[in-house]
Amino acid sequence: MNKANPHIVVGMSGGVDSAVTALLLKQQGYRVTGVFMKNWEDDEDENCPARQDFLDVLAVAEMIGIEVEAVNFSAEYKDRVFSYFLREYQAGRTPNPDVLCNAEIKFKAFLDYAIGLGAEKIATGHYARLHERDGFFELHKAVDSSKDQSYFLYRLNQAQLSRSMFPLGELHKTEVRRIAEQAGLPNAAKKDSTGICFIGERPFREFLQRYLPIQPGDMRTPEGRVMGRHQGLMYHTIGQRQGLGIGGAGEPWFVAGKDIVRNELIVVQGHDHPLLYSSRLFAADLSWAAGTAPDSAQAYAAKTRYRQSDAPCRLVQVTANAVTIAFDSPQWAVTPGQSVVLYQGDVCLGGGIIQGSEPSAADSLA
């Protein structure tokens, strides 16, 4: 390997972020190769325009003068990510497949592939930062707080972080757009993608029905009053307001819980109903980006969903497999299946998958 001209393999999606990532690294003197990852086979579906994305990657690569190739990780994606996605929904939870995709595909399958190409490191267009301290790699929030993606990267381990680069972590999105426009990149004005590719813009219920059976049941209040019927617990998440079909006067209705045994959806009226707030949560399947579990004696902050503000908290109990987190102020719509991610200042320490929570009120869902 030529240490004077390190080889960096960039994961290119066809979007402006990964295009600017490749451009910046090329300008900094690295030997850059672009790789387009195909993670879903349903290419004919207009909701997952992989062909156009690859054409955009080719156009960018030609303009900045780098080699590019495509690699198919569809089998790995279905085995490691999509199967988990279906299991979680079938169990009544609300998973976040983007978190697992990063850990299992973009920073595992792709990293292994890049190393096979002779790369020293991989780079992606994620908005996050890395700091090395005494041989350990700290995952930090991005400078642009509105685009920070450290939440989605918390499952990366030290070995993965040590071979990764996030060139956009010090930039704001407006600067990234400006760089792309000044360089004349063909996708400079391309709209940011939303959601995960295998769902795209299509109706969520329609997509799930292709893989999971419909199981209708009652929607009831905590007191036992039946308010209507649901078509499947998998279609609903804690805090959901839209799509319940409950009319009448007064405040809107929200999903507050699921009774898996009875196949019942628990609904409450009013955004500030106490059953929508949790003072504690319980998480398992832990992964610590910091390399070790945090010290329970210190103060931290946590996010229970992306875009949420940091919530001050403390660790009541930490074991090898589980953690109990108590919040200074009750948190709204804590959702099983989602990730809770722990921070100390700007440093992302890691987290786990939410298993359940403890309502801030003494009321019970039963």
Image (cartoon, grey):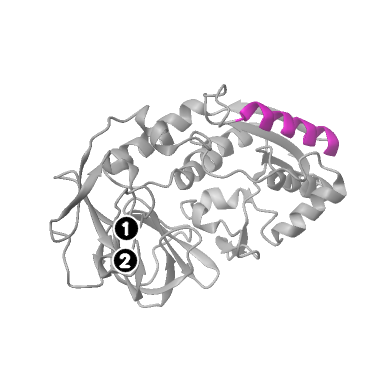
Q: Which residues are magenta?
A: 49-64
Of marks 1 and 2, which one's residue comes earlier in the chain?
A: 1
Three-letter amino acid code at the position of disc 1: Phe
Q: Which quadrant of the figure has residue 186? A: top right
> In the image, 160: left or right of 100?
right
Does the magenta portion include 324? no
Q: Quadrant of the N terminus?
A: top right
- As rendered, which of 145 and 362 lies closer to the eye? 362
Residue occupying the point 57% across, 63% down: 140
Residue position marked by numbered label 1 in the rendering = 254
Task: Give coordinates of residue 93: x percent, y percent.
Answer: 31, 47
Instruction: Assign a secondary structure to mark 1.
Output: strand
Image location of residue 70, percent across then percent down: 65, 27
Q: Residue 324: in sight, yes or no?
A: no
Q: Is residue 274 above or below residue 126?
A: below
Q: Amino acid at mark 2?
A: Gly
Label annotation for residue 270? 2
